[in-house]
């Protein structure tokens, strides 16, 4: 290893990653303070860091980044698919998840039963569920039939929230996919279980968007 052009063989040598130029086998290393990964979570995988029986989103990274303490910034049900953000940036995760910031999450959902304007209005008004009243949410109907398709945008993240809001309207969610978290949109070229690091622009947008 070379530090600022000088060979270093002492494993205990202290480097300042923000200032020192470090190279190994002729390659300059760049230091990333935080890691940000978007994953297209597949069905059947849980969005936790560890589980004794189920595969987790961390398992899908197959040991890459195992030296970093990555965690999912927000839960997605085991049977739901789509965007999960994995990071070790606790401050950003907190900002995305803090209820007071009302960060919008958009989902594509398929539900049993027909959707109509009365559902759109109920979502827009905020709905009384068993243990809380939801904030106003946006329901956009794409197709109304025996199985209806829609986009749902919520700005909180209560347990099973979309499923419970639909259930309160007498509809069962049969497919749920998260498309966005704040300004971050799922890269639709990622197949189920695929992941990639965020681009500079995506990281910038997460750090600079207006939340409440
Ligand atoms: N709403 C749900 O019902 N499930 C999720 O995983 C996310 C939002």
Image (cartoon, rainbow, N blue to C red):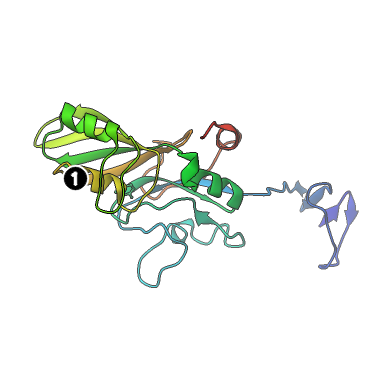
Q: Residues within 10 Å of mark 1 (few under 14, many from 20)?
A: some
Q: Residue 169: x and y, percent?
A: 17, 41
Determine whether 34 is above or below 186 in the image: below
Which one is nearer the viewer's eye here, 88 or 116?
Answer: 116
Q: Would residue 73 be visible to someone looking at this image?
A: yes
Q: How many labels does the image show?
A: 1
In the picture provided, is 59 more to the left or to the right than 109?
Answer: right
The quadrant holding residue 13 is: bottom right
Q: Residue 39: x and y, percent?
A: 44, 47
Determine whether 40 is above or below 115 in the image: below
Tell me what residue is drawn at x 59 percent, y 54 percent.
88
In the picture provided, is 8 more to the left or to the right than 111?
Answer: right
Farthest bottom residue in view: 52
In the picture provided, is 18 more to the left or to the right than 98?
Answer: right
Which one is nearer the viewer's eye here, 142 or 186?
Answer: 142
Tell me what residue is drawn at x 81 percent, y 57 percent.
1
Determine whether 160 is above or below 184 in the image: below
Tell me what residue is drawn at x 40 percent, y 39 percent.
155
Helix, strand or loop at disc 1?
Answer: helix
Q: Name the residue under label 1.
A: 168
Farthest right residue in view: 6
Q: Residue 34: x and y, percent?
A: 64, 49
Tell me what residue is drawn at x 55 percent, y 32 percent.
209
Q: Residue 205: x and y, percent?
A: 56, 32
Which one is nearer the viewer's eye here, 53 or 125?
Answer: 125
């Amino acid at each position: 290893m070379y530090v600022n052009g000088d060979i270093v063989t002492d494993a205990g040598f202290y480097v300042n990653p923000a200032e020192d130029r470090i190279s190994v086998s002729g390659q300059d290393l760049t230091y990333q303070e935080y890691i940000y990964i978007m994953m297209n979570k597949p069905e059947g995988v849980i969005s936790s860091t560890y589980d004794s029986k189920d595969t987790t989103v961390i398992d899908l990274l197959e040991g890459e980044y195992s030296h970093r303490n990555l965690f999912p910034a927000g839960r997605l049900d085991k049977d739901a698919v789509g965007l999960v953000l994995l990071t070790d940036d606790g401050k950003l995760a907190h900002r995305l998840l803090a209820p007071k910031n009302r960060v919008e999450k958009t989902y594509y959902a398929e539900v049993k039963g027909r959707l109509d304007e009365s559902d759109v209005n109920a979502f827009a008004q905020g709905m009384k569920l068993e243990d809380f009243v939801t904030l106003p949410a946006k329901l956009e109907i794409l197709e109304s039939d025996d199985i209806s398709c829609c986009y749902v945008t919520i700005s909180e993240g209560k347990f099973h929230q979309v499923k419970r809001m639909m259930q309160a309207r007498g509809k069962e969610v049969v497919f749920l996919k998260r498309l966005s978290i704040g300004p971050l949109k799922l890269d639709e070229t990622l197949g189920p279980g695929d992941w990639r690091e965020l681009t500079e622009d995506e990281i910038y947008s997460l750090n600079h968007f207006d939340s409440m």
